[in-house]
Amino acid sequence: MSVESPVSVDPQSAQLQRIWVECLGQVIGQVAGFPVTVEASGDEEPAPQGTEPAKPPACMVITVSKALQGDMAILTPEAGALALAQVLVSDQLNAAVPFDKERRDAYEELLRQVLGQVATSLKQAAGAEVEVKPCGNEAPSWAEASRLAIRITGGKLRPIQMTLLVSAELVKSLGARAEVKAPHPPAQEAPRAIPAAPTAEPAIPPKPEAPAGRSSNLELLLDVKLDATIRFGQKPMLLREILELLPGTAVALDRQVQEPVELLVGGRVVAHGDVVIVDGNYGIRITEILSPQQRIESLGKQK
């Protein structure tokens, strides 16, 4: 897989391009069922002369917060977005079918799975917690934004040319974070005067080490089975409303589609994440989680 970028691209944008190339390759390779190549491309391919104006591309705008600040967007021609949606749902590739709401939702679900991988890679790059969330579908017109191309090929797929837009704010934030992570040489201290040897005092015996009983007790509990539950949301309802429920009734929960879902163990929230599809089953990709010690303490508070 090639991830080389044009020389004119700044290092931060090139780093984001490499992250997207790797994450797209991982996710699409898992769901496609055939070899897929994702690579960085130098420039966007111009439309052939004499062709009809292209339809507006499918766009997802993403906001980045916490350790990094800024925005980015991924744009895909409608035909490419349709093909990626068909790959996700294991449908036959057919460019003649309409790119309707159902297929657009499938395409956006694929991108959300990719975003879970992108968030993990950005966290490693920044050395701190990074939050990545979709925030819109209108193609942005940012000033001085980096514009990078990503090409997807493989199997029966027609080449798909995606465009990654990176705001100047995000480029600056990633560069500043890289400077913070760079090691600095230790400052040389002035030589200190050597104090006179103190008079002999009785030696203080070292404190005894904590017994390893706690660790061994934990080992005994590691095979205990616990119920893990994914909570999409909740809604308080009157008994009257519950008795009036019928097949086809829609119940609105208190959580929006773009918000992460909660992972509960023993009735307590231990993590947040994004909903994904794994081998035809619903799953959750963890984006935030309590430390192991916090998880143990949370489980210990159960009544």
Image (cartoon, rainbow, N blue to C red):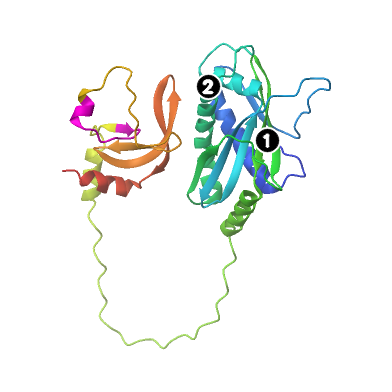
Task: Kindly identify which residue carries mark 2.
Answer: 101
Residue 245, relative to residue 196: is it above or below?
A: above
Query: Crowding at label 2, few (<14), some or many (≥20) Cα neighbours within 10 Å?
Result: few
Q: Which residue is more in the foreground, 184 or 132?
A: 132
Q: Which numbered disc flags the more N-terminal residue, 1 or 2?
A: 1
In magenta segment, residue 239: yes
Q: Which residue is pictured at 76% across the width and 40% down the height?
A: 6
Q: Find numbered disc 2 in the image and state the secondary structure of the residue it sits on.
A: helix
Q: Amino acid at mark 1?
A: Val
Q: Position of residue 29 (x, y in %)?
A: 56, 24
Of tags 1 and 2, the one toward the viewer is 2
Quarter of the view holding residue 234: top left
- Please state if 45 lies on the left or on the right of 119 as rendered: right
- Please state if 246 lies on the left or on the right of 87 as rendered: left
Q: Which residue is pictured at 58% across the width and 49% down the height?
A: 70
Q: Which residue is at the far right?
A: 49
Q: Which residue is pictured at 25% across the width and 66% down the height?
A: 207
Residue 150, relative to residue 287: is it above or below?
A: above
Residue 205 seen in the figure: yes
Task: Kindly identify which residue carries mark 1.
Answer: 3
**Quarter of the figure that contains the N terminus:** top right
Q: Which residue is more in the foreground, 22 or 187?
A: 22
Q: Which residue is pictured at 77% across the width and 45% down the height?
A: 8
Query: Crowding at label 1, few (<14), some or many (≥20) Cα neighbours within 10 Å?
Result: some
Q: Position of residue 229 (x, y in %)?
A: 30, 32
Q: Which residue is more in the foreground, 296 or 164?
A: 164
In magenta segment, residue 74: no
The numbered mark at residue 108 is: none
Q: Which residues are magenta?
A: 229-242
